[in-house]
């Protein structure tokens, strides 16, 4: 099955059709820079331009840099605050006229890495961090994924991502050593709580890992992501495929119908799990 994967980031939105059985892009990425904050409807129109560029008529998976519950966007740390509370599935499926599934951007990147990238064949406890405009995080264990918001852990009273995101290194012109040591401290704190066996570092800066991995003094094995710039696109597409299969299994009549009836915040949580 082919799915259009779209990765919404802090400074650009990019997409490409993906063969979800191999994780390969079926065409070169189409990227639109977004130097100014886009409102939700502008962002949806931009996603529509990506679908139009590929003359896309199938399902779409979208990775968004915030907490996503069902199809609802609950946080937007680095994008327009008007996204908060938006029904993302409705927003993007209306703009594209196509069925949409949504997932957190780092969780999408993690899915791609665990299925086809550096984490394939690893069934233990893995933590993936994406270092970009913000810091994204997701945990994996025995094939299950758990999107996290560890970039907002407070370090010295501030969100960790304000100290260790790649954007901070660039903005403050921090040396590899200075930034590497900050990252080491942050990862050390995460390790004390989560005890991952494998840590995968993603985001564009993972390509330069040789410059700062030497400052990471971790218990777990640390490896760079394999999918560099494509992880978010591939993972968003994989997520849409996974959602579609889930809906089928649960008796829904396919993706489009389910996309029109996304689950709402809190819906579908077994009663015994609700405190
Ligand atoms: C957001 C996360 C996102 C990360 C990377 C953070 O600011 O809260 O949801 O995954 O940035 O984009």
Image (cartoon, helix red, strand yellow):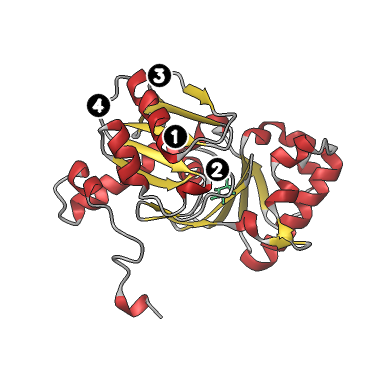
The residue wearing badge 2 is 79
**Res 31 visible:** yes
The residue wearing badge 1 is 43
Classify mark 2: residues with Cα within 10 Å, few (<14), some (14-19) or many (20+): many
Label at residue 27: 3
Location of residue 105 in the rendering, given as x and y in whole percent from the top left corner: 49, 44
Q: Residue at x 80, y 51 (%)?
A: 182
Q: Marks 4 and 3, how far apart in space? A: 15 Å
User: Badges 4 and 3: C-beta atoms under 8 Å apart?
Assistant: no
The mark closer to the camera, 3 or 2, is 2
Give the mark nearer the N terminus: 3 vs 2.
3
**Based on the displayed image, in which of its 4 quarters is residue 50 positioned?**
top left
Q: Marks 4 and 1, how far apart in space? A: 19 Å
The residue wearing badge 4 is 57
Label at residue 248: none
Give the mark nearer the N terminus: 3 vs 1.
3
Q: Residue at x 80, y 44 (%)?
A: 179
User: Badges 3 and 2: C-beta atoms under 8 Å apart?
Assistant: no
The mark closer to the camera, 4 or 3, is 4
User: Badges 1 and 2: C-beta atoms under 8 Å apart?
Assistant: yes
Classify mark 3: residues with Cα within 10 Å, few (<14), some (14-19) or many (20+): few
Q: Is residue 36 above or below residue 200?
A: above
The quadrant of the picture occupied by the N terminus is top left
Give the mark nearer the N terminus: 4 vs 3.
3
Give the mark nearer the N terminus: 4 vs 1.
1
């Amino acid at each position: 099955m082919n799915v259009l994967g779209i990765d919404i980031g802090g400074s650009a939105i990019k997409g490409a059709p993906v063969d979800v059985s191999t994780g390969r892009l079926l065409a070169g990425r189409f990227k639109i820079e977004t130097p100014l904050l886009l409102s939700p409807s502008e962002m949806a129109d931009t996603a529509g331009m990506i679908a139009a560029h590929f003359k896309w008529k199938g399902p779409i998976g979208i990775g968004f840099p915030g907490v996503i519950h069902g199809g609802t966007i609950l946080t937007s740390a680095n994008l327009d605050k008007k996204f908060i509370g938006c029904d993302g599935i409705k927003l993007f499926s209306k703009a594209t006229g196509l069925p949409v599934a949504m997932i957190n951007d780092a969780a999408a990147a993690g899915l791609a890495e665990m299925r086809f990238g550096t984490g394939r064949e690893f069934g233990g406890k893995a933590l993936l961090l994406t270092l970009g405009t913000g810091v994204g995080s997701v945990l994996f264990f025995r094939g299950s994924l758990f999107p996290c918001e560890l970039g907002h852990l407070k370090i010295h009273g501030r969100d960790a991502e304000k100290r260790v995101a790649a954007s901070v290194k660039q903005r403050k012109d921090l040396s590899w050593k200075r930034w590497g040591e900050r990252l080491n401290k942050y990862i050390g704190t995460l390790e004390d709580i989560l005890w991952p066996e494998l840590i995968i570092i993603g985001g564009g800066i993972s390509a330069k890992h040789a410059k700062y991995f030497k400052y990471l003094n971790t218990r777990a094995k640390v490896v760079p992501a394999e999918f560099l710039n494509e992880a978010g696109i591939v993972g968003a597409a994989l997520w849409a495929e996974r959602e579609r299969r889930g809906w089928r299994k649960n008796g829904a009549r396919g993706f489009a119908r389910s996309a029109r009836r996304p689950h709402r915040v809190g819906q579908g949580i077994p009663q015994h799990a609700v405190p």
